[in-house]
Amino acid sequence: MRRCLPPVLALLAVLFLVASCGGPPVGEKPDAPSPAPAPSSPPPSGQPAAGPAKVIGVTLLNRGALFYRDLEEGLREAARRHGFELVVTAADFDLGRQSAQMEDFVARKVDAIVLCPVDSKGVGPAVRRANAAGIPVFTADIAAQEGDVVCHVASDNVAGGRLAGEYLAKALGGKGRVAIINQPVVTSVLDRVQGFREAIARFPGIEIVADVNGQGVRDKALEATSDVLQAHPELGGIFGINDDSVLGALDAVRQFKRDGVVLVGYDATEPAVDAITKGTALKADVIQYPRKIGVTTIDTIAAHFAGTALPKTIPVEVGIVDQESLAAPAAR
């Protein structure tokens, strides 16, 4: 008589055969297909995704000058803080080049333009083209005389000119003949000369005998000053409207061995400060803060983008340095 498996053993055998065939364990359903990855969640309400960075075109008067290198550093410092992208160019005193740079910014459809004009009046057509394209224009250091500029950020150049005039007048003891090495196509320079003339007018013993164009560059200023020194052997003082101008004048004074002439400049760049420190005929310089001008310009543009009403002009403070102040522990 055949012997039969006990009922419990038979049940276990069946379960083993089912499991070995790959079926799901008893009491469980087959695995469901894996769900598709969920799409990225949208940003929370009220926090839209960040758009592309604002692009700001910059055309400097001259990138080679220390003043404009410092101004550019200020622009870049503030642009990084605001998340702006800068496209920086330089005209190198060439109005045609600057106009072409403005045209390129318009073609690129930049969000704003920072302009340091080569020629305050001549740049007008380029400003108007940007206006027509709906691109806001801001000027830094030098103003434009034509076209619509949202805001002009610059040193208080009239006040700086007054400081230069007062210093020179006192250095001459309130009497003597002086000359101006000018650059009359630039509004900031016109302001400096205005302030200088206002200060000198308070000293009846001082006469301005020459006002010549040194074109804002050292070699041209040397030539212009040489002509003045030959025409006015009694000249007692010179005001150079920037440091290239006054250093060119200093070169001429040395060539003509006229070290008794007192020179006052404008910008307080390193070469001028060095000449003052060494006790040359260059006795003082109006000091500007170009980095602060750059930072203020970008902050002003950010405020415009945010819808803030702006004044037409934002002045930045100036001061004056001479050998005594430069020797002080806190100087510069």
Image (tube, rainbow, N blue to C red):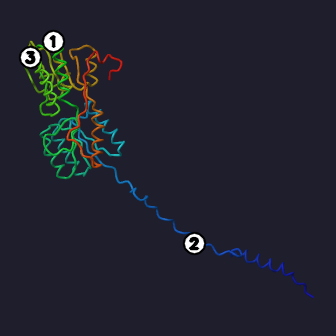
In the rendered structure, are the residues bearing label 2 and label 3 in contact, judged by CB atoms less than 8 Å apart? Answer: no
Q: Nearer the N terminus, badge 2 or badge 3? A: 2
Residue 72 is labelled as none
Comparing 295 with 212, the one in front is 295
Spot the residue most to the bottom.
1
Percent position of residue 57, x then y: 26, 45
Residue 33 is labelled as 2
Q: Residue at x 64, y 75 (%)?
A: 30
Q: Quadrant of the C terminus?
A: top left
Mark 1–mark 2 distance (CA, rounded to whole Å)? 98 Å
Say what amino acid the circle numbered 3 marks: Pro
Q: Nearer the N terminus, badge 1 or badge 2? A: 2
Report which quarter residue 1 is drawn in.
bottom right
In the rendered structure, are the residues bearing label 3 and label 1 in contact, judged by CB atoms less than 8 Å apart? Answer: no
Percent position of residue 69, x then y: 28, 33
Q: Secondary structure at mark 3?
A: loop
Report which quarter residue 116 is drawn in.
top left
Crowd rating for badge 1 (residues with CA inside 10 Å; few <14, some 14–19, many 20+): few
Residue 204 is labelled as 3
